[in-house]
Amino acid sequence: MVVVRFLDFVMALLLGNIIAHPLSDEELGLEGSMITMGVLVILYVVGVLVALRWNAIKKFFNPSPITLIENGQIDYRNLLKQG
């Protein structure tokens, strides 16, 4: 089973966008995009390593799921927490 976290999804979108701009416009250099992409990847790896070491930060980045429907009944208390 593959679990994609929200942060992984956002990083994939950001990196794709950074790569797409210089490829679509010939006047833009590839150097700035490569530097930006490198910095983002380094920050992402550091963030993941920090989250692995400290549980408080891990819970901030990956909160535990909240059950909204249990046994066919809507749990309104948990629904209010999400809104």
Image: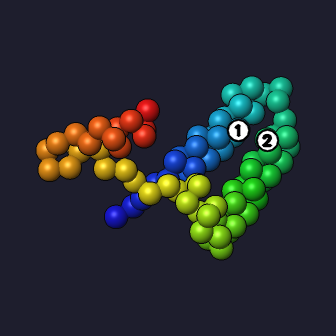
Q: Position of residue 61 (x, y in %)?
A: 58, 55
Relative placement, left or right, of 62 versus 51 is left
- The one of 21 and 36 positioned closer to us in this rendering: 36
Q: Are marks 2 and 1 in contact (CB under 8 Å)?
A: yes
Give the residue at mark 1.
Answer: 18
Q: Position of residue 56 (x, y in %)?
A: 62, 64
Sequence-wise first label, 2 or 1: 1
Residue drawn where x is 59% and y is 55% of the image: 60
Q: Is residue 12 visible?
A: no
Give the residue at mark 2.
Answer: 33
**Which label number is shown at residue 52?**
none
- The one of 53 and 41 positioned closer to us in this rendering: 53
Q: Position of residue 77 (x, y in %)?
A: 33, 41
Q: Amino acid at mark 1?
A: Ile
Relative placement, left or right, of 80 versus 11 is left
SS at badge 2: helix
Quadrant, the C terminus? top left
Question: Residue most toward the left?
Answer: 72
Colour mapping used in the image: rainbow
Q: Residues within 10 Å of mark 1 (few under 14, many from 20)?
A: some
Relative placement, left or right, of 11 versus 33 is left
**Quadrant in the picture for residue 13:** top right
Location of residue 1 with respect to 82 vertically, above or below: below
Question: Residue most toward the front?
Answer: 77
**Quadrant in the picture for residue 78:** top left
Q: Is residue 10 visible?
A: yes
Residue drawn where x is 83% and y is 26% of the image: 27
